[in-house]
Amino acid sequence: MRYSVLLLGLALAAVGWGQVASGAGDVGKGAAKAAADVGKGTAGAVGDLVTLHPVDAAASLGKGGAKGGTHLATGTLKGTGKIAKGVGKGIKKIL
């Protein structure tokens, strides 16, 4: 029983590894882009507040948050899809 579980894990790792790694990369890229967008929006908002433009500050902050959320969602969905595809390939090879 122990060996069958070990072999199952090895087969999943060997067959779908490229897809899983690519998916993890997509999740990471999405998170990095999201953090950059939020940072840009926050920096723009601070600059607008310092120059006494509160309406522009709110717009910059909202724009950065919206772009960040979009990149985070896109990266997560693409990455999850690739990971699922890689795991599916591994299970298909076993069965």
Image (tube, rainbow, N blue to C red):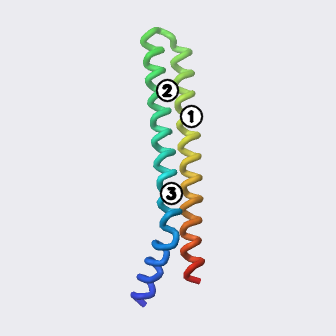
Neighbours of disc 3 within 10 Å: few (<14), some (14-19), many (20+): some
Determine contact: label 1, label 2, CB under 8 Å: yes
Work out how far the residue at label 1 is from the one at label 2, CA to CA, in angstroms: 9 Å
The Cα atoms of the two marked residues, 3 and 1, are separated by: 23 Å
Residue 93, horizontal then vertical, whole percent:
57, 79
Task: Name the residue: 44% across, 83% down.
Answer: 7
Q: Nearer the viewer, residue 57 or 34?
A: 34
- Residue found 52% across the figure and 69% down from its top: 16
Classify 10 Å Cα crowding around label 2: few (below 14), some (14-19), many (20 and above). many
Instruction: From this view, report whether residue 46 is shown above or below residue 16.
Output: above
Q: Which amino acid type corresponds to the residue marked 3 in the rendered image?
A: Ser
The answer to whether 45 is drawn above or below residue 91 in the figure is above
Q: Position of residue 55 (x, y in %)?
A: 56, 15
Q: Residue at x 51, y 18 (%)?
A: 57
**What residue is shown at x 59% (from left), y 65% (from top)?**
85
User: Which structural element holds mark 1?
Assistant: helix
Discs 3/1, front: 3
Picture disc at residue 46? none
- Residues at marks 3 and 2, CA–CA distance in whole angstroms: 29 Å
| Picture disc at residue 67 | 1
Tell me the kind of residue under disc 1: Lys
The quarter in which the C terminus is drawn is: bottom right
Residue that carries the numbered disc 3 in the rendered image: 22
Q: Which residue is mark 2?
A: 41
Q: Position of residue 29 (x, y in %)?
A: 48, 46
Q: In the figure, 21 relative to 36: above or below? A: below
Q: Nearer the viewer, residue 54 or 92?
A: 92
Q: Quadrant of the N terminus?
A: bottom left
Q: Are marks 3 and 2 in contact (CB under 8 Å)?
A: no
Which residue appears farthest toward the top when viewing the image?
A: 52
Q: How many marks?
A: 3
Which is more N-terminal, label 2 or label 1? 2
